């Protein structure tokens, strides 16, 4: 019979001091070989992004796998991504699509988009992915005007200061049942600072407040730790 959890945690051999980012990263490295088999395509995408000088701000491998699983659970056929970077998360998401699915990914930086294009082609997914380059605040209204929605799954991982501007447009491109995931909302706890000077943290804070006030959305915010540090993501479902 198992000991109560409180008793287990109280044993001296299980007592630990405050966890550090190095320890969080070690746990990620423990998880990855167990649940994420080696993947030459994804590893090549990371190498190509690093070689091109792209910032290492994309999702971690466990987070990428989570995105793929969430999209599969949703049964997504149409996916929208805000923030392509080097296409690492794009590859994870596109792998969740059926052969006739579609993923539209938006990227501000043309150099980043070029790296992503090569990574997506190497993954054999270019037939599923449409890239659009330019400010998302301009591209999103264009998608609405074109009738590109609704999307089944939307992943927001772009400039955090603009998250509040993106939310109304993502809702325009949604329908009941659309799943929305927005990354980097806790920002090492900086989201707690209402008078902070960091535009990214203020954007994350305002986005979360707007999401909570939106009557047609059911949402939560999950804190995370790992190789990317202390952060968190919003998970929302459009109800009406």
Image: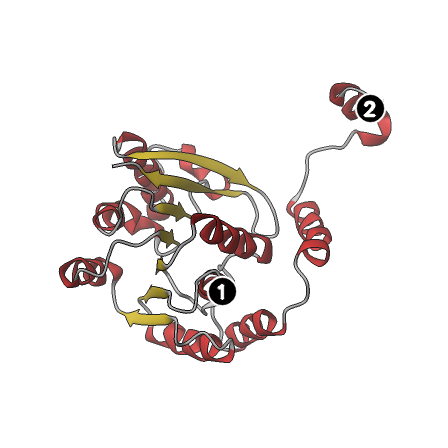
Dot 1 and dot 2 residues touching (CB under 8 Å): no
Quadrant including the N terminus: top right
Give neighbour class at mark 2: few <14, some 14-19, many 20+ (Cα, 10 Å). Answer: few
Residue beneath the point at 42% across and 43% down: 185
For marks 1 and 2, the one nearer the N-term is: 2
Farthest-out residue, left = 145
Q: Nearer the viewer, residue 85 or 130?
A: 130
Quadrant including the C terminus: top left
Count up the numbered dots. Answer: 2
- Residue topped by disc 2: 2
Q: In this view, does 66 lie to the left or right of 217?
A: right
Q: Where is residue 218 in the image (x, y as percent from the top left)?
A: 35, 33
Q: Is residue 122 left or right of residue 25?
A: left
Q: Where is residue 30 in the image (x, y as percent from the top left)?
A: 73, 52
Give neighbour class at mark 1: few <14, some 14-19, many 20+ (Cα, 10 Å). Answer: some
Mark 1 secondary-structure assignment? loop
> Against 104, is 70 above or below?
above
> Against 220, is 166 above or below?
below
Q: Is residue 198 left or right of residue 142?
A: right
Q: Which of 50 and 124 is in front in this view?
A: 124
Mark number, residue 11: none
The scheme the figure's colours follow is secondary structure
Q: Where is residue 97 in the image (x, y as percent from the top left)?
A: 44, 62
| Separation of marks 1 and 2 at Cα, in angstroms | 40 Å
Q: Where is residue 83 in the image (x, y as percent from the top left)?
A: 37, 61
Mark 2 secondary-structure assignment? loop
Q: Is residue 11 left or right of residue 223?
A: right
Residue beneath the point at 43% across and 48% down: 74
Residue beneath the point at 42% across and 34% down: 220
- Residue topped by disc 1: 95
């Amino acid at each position: 019979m198992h000991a109560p959890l409180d008793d287990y945690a109280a044993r001296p051999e299980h007592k630990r001091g405050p966890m550090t980012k190095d320890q969080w990263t070690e746990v990620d490295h423990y998880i990855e070989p167990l649940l994420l088999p080696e993947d030459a395509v994804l590893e090549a995408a990371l190498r190509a992004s690093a070689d091109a000088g792209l910032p290492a701000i994309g999702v971690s491998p466990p987070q990428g796998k989570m995105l793929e699983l969430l999209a599969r659970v949703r049964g997504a056929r149409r996916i929208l991504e805000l923030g392509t970077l080097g296409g690492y998360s794009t590859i994870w998401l596109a792998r969740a699509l059926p052969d006739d699915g579609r993923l539209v990914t938006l990227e501000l930086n043309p150099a980043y988009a070029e790296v992503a294009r090569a990574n997506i082609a190497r993954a054999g997914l270019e037939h599923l992915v449409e890239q659009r380059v330019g400010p998302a605040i301009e591209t999103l209204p264009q998608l609405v005007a074109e009738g590109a929605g609704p999307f089944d799954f939307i992943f927001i991982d772009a400039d955090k200061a603009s998250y509040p501007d993106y939310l109304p447009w993502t809702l325009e491109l949604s329908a009941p049942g659309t799943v929305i995931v927005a990354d980097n909302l806790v920002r090492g706890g900086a989201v707690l600072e209402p008078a902070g000077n960091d535009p990214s943290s203020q954007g994350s804070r305002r986005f979360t407040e707007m999401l909570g006030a939106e009557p047609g959305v059911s949402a939560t915010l999950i804190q995370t730790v790992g190789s990317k540090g202390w952060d968190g993501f919003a998970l929302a479902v459009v109800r009406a």
